[in-house]
């Protein structure tokens, strides 16, 4: 696939001298925004007690943030072009910090949900805007390095979120998961004010003005908002067995089709879908979607496995999973340095998918007796693989777009990345429940008293071996023994369900290994964005 040729006029006068300060400034905002998608997960039970809320009600603390975030991300390019990227970024940081403080001080669930909506909507600008700023600030031969540094915040933050959130909640209070955003966000605001400036073409575009795509905005809100709600909460309602899921999906699909038709005709669309006509952009985005699917899906499954089946607490589970972030960071920095010397980093994408497949295959062999080290090393390998893939694909995706459209390209890129993550989480949740029910039915149907005798003989080696003290009760049909053995069957069924999902992901990663052959060398940072 060929990319656009040419080089980017990568910065305004004087900008290169501050390029790393610019990188730190925008990375602070990006890290905060992504961190808040996962840091509160482990605090939900504590918030549930504070607000006297049910499990279903407290889940809106997560859903509201994701919905608002998903709606606003694709609007970022248009808003930046119309009002200025720096002005929009600063406004977003200021509102995000204020909303974080209000979340920490919330006195009711209703207040919390409203403040999380505001927080999610404000934070949406930080990811695509920071990506566009870095691509314009760094010269072509350093764009992969810039994406590597940026990716550290984007990919390590959701991994570290539960660990940090668990520690803060256990040692301080769940409210400090929000309060810590205030000083860091304030620093980001000041640094962006001092060091980040809009390029000349954005200033000229803002001066020209233009039409406002009100219809596109409305269709975007309806289609993406309903889609995010269905993906996040459909499992709780048994998907299409619930009428609201059917209606919401239908309205979302109709709005999306209308949106595509409208945006392709409108002169100044809020979502520039014409960028998808660039083959290398579309292909790279497809790979990012697949990687986000695996990243966020396993990010959901692994903590559940460690806490529900192995009995780890939130803090210990977070510590066990944290090395994946370290692996990602090391690989990203390696790729960034290799790209500076014009090393062909395309094969690293294939190697990255090899490592991800190896890590997932190892996970598919876990059992209820797995040791901590056997959990840690596949996570590190998977993190190394993701770190090799992400910087190259991020630079490739944006380097093939003209600089005037890079903001729209970053918005579209992050919309698809966000969608891949949402679909991955939704698929993992549904598949886990469905496969567990299937395995449980099979194991229950084939379990007999003779299996109990055989299992009791090896009781010391079987997870839950203490249950075999109830063997006489099992044989005579007493409830205590039957309940104990059924709990063990449930655990085994859940374990088999995890194994199934990890095998499916392994196959998917193997299929994607040769994908790097379809990317030309000069599409990933050897050249920059076209004029």
Image: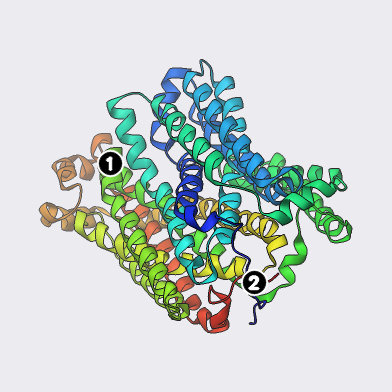
Q: Position of residue 129 (x, y in %)?
A: 60, 50
In this rendering, the answer to whether 330 lies above or below 175 is below
Residue at image position (68%, 63%) is: 403
- Residue 315 coordinates in the image, percent (x, y): 27, 39
Give the SS element for disc 1.
Answer: helix
Relative to residue 175, is residue 71 drawn left or right? right
Label 1: how many residues lie within 10 Å, few (<14), some (14-19) or many (20+)? some
Lower position in the chain sequence, tag 2 or tag 1 = 2
Q: Is residue 474 visible?
A: yes
Q: Which residue is mark 2?
A: 400
According to the picture, the residue beneath numbered tag 1 turns out to be 482
Q: Where is residue 380 drawn, in percent x and y?
A: 30, 61
**Residue 8 position (above or below residue 497):** below
Residue 32's disc number = none
With 108 as the anchor, is 464 left or right in this view?
A: left
371 displayed left or right of 90: left
Mark 2 or 1, closer to the camera: 2
Q: Quadrant of residue 242?
A: top right
Q: State the colouring used for the structure image.
A: rainbow
Judged from this view, the residue extending furthest toward the front is 14
Q: Are marks 2 and 1 in contact (CB under 8 Å)?
A: no
Q: Position of residue 278 (x, y in %)?
A: 71, 73
- For disc 2, the neighbor class at 10 Å (few under 14, some 14 to 19, many from 20) is many
Depth check: give the residue in front, 247 or 373. 373
The image shows a total of numbered marks equal to: 2
Query: For the residues marked 2 and 1, what is the alpha-carbon distance in whole angstroms?
Result: 63 Å
* Residue 423 visible, this orientation: no
């Amino acid at each position: 696939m060929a990319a656009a040729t040419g080089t980017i006029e990568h910065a305004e006068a004087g900008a290169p001298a501050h390029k790393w300060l610019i990188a730190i400034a925008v990375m602070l905002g990006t890290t905060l925004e992504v961190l808040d998608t996962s840091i509160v997960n482990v605090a939900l039970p504590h918030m549930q007690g504070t607000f006297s809320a049910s499990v279903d009600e407290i889940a809106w603390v997560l859903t509201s943030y994701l919905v608002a975030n998903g709606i606003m991300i694709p609007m970022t390019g248009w808003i930046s072009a119309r009002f200025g990227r720096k002005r929009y970024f600063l406004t977003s940081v200021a509102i995000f910090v204020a909303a974080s403080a209000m979340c920490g001080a919330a006195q009711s669930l209703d207040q919390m949900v409203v403040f999380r909506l505001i927080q999610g909507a404000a934070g949406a600008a930080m990811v695509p805007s920071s990506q566009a700023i870095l691509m314009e600030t760094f010269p072509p031969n350093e764009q992969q390095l810039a994406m590597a540094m940026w990716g550290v915040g984007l990919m390590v933050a959701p991994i570290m979120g539960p660990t940090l959130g668990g520690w803060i909640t256990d040692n301080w209070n769940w409210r400090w998961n929000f309060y810590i955003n205030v000083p860091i966000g304030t620093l980001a605001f000041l640094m962006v004010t001092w060091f980040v400036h809009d390029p000349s073409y954005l200033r000229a575009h803002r001066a020209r003005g233009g039409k406002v795509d009100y219809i596109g905005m409305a269709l975007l809100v309806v289609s993406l908002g309903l889609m995010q709600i269905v993906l996040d909460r459909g499992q709780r309602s048994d998907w299409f067995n619930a009428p609201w899921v059917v209606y919401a999906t239908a309205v979302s699909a109709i709005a999306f089709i209308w949106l595509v038709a409208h945006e392709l005709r409108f002169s100044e669309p809020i979502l520039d879908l014409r960028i998808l006509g660039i083959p290398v952009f579309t292909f790279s985005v497809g790979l990012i979607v697949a990687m986000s699917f695996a990243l966020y899906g396993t990010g959901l499954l692994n903590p559940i496995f460690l806490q529900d089946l192995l009995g780890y607490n939130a803090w210990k589970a977070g510590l066990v999973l944290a090395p994946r972030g370290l692996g990602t960071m090391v690989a990203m920095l390696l790729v960034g340095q290799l790209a500076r010397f014009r090393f062909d980093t395309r094969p690293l994408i294939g190697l990255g998918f090899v490592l991800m497949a190896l890590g997932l295959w190892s996970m598919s062999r876990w059992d209820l007796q797995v040791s901590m080290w056997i959990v840690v090393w596949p996570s590190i390998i998977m993190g190394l693989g993701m770190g090799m893939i992400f910087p190259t694909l991020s630079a490739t995706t944006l380097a093939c777009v003209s600089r005037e459209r890079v903001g729209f390209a970053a918005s579209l890129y992050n919309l698809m990345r966000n969608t891949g993550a949402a679909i991955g989480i939704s698929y993992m949740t549904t598949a886990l429940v469905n496969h567990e029910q299937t395995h449980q039915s099979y194991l229950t149907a084939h379990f007999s008293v003779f299996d109990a005798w055989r299992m009791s003989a090896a009781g010391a080696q079987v997870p839950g071996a203490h249950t075999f003290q109830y063997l006489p009760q099992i044989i005579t049909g007493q409830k205590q023994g039957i309940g104990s053995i059924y709990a063990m069957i449930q655990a085994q069924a859940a374990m088999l369900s995890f194994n199934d999902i990890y095998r499916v992901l392994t196959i998917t990663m193997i299929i994607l290994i040769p994908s790097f052959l379809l990317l030309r060398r000069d599409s990933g940072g050897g050249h920059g964005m076209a004029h």
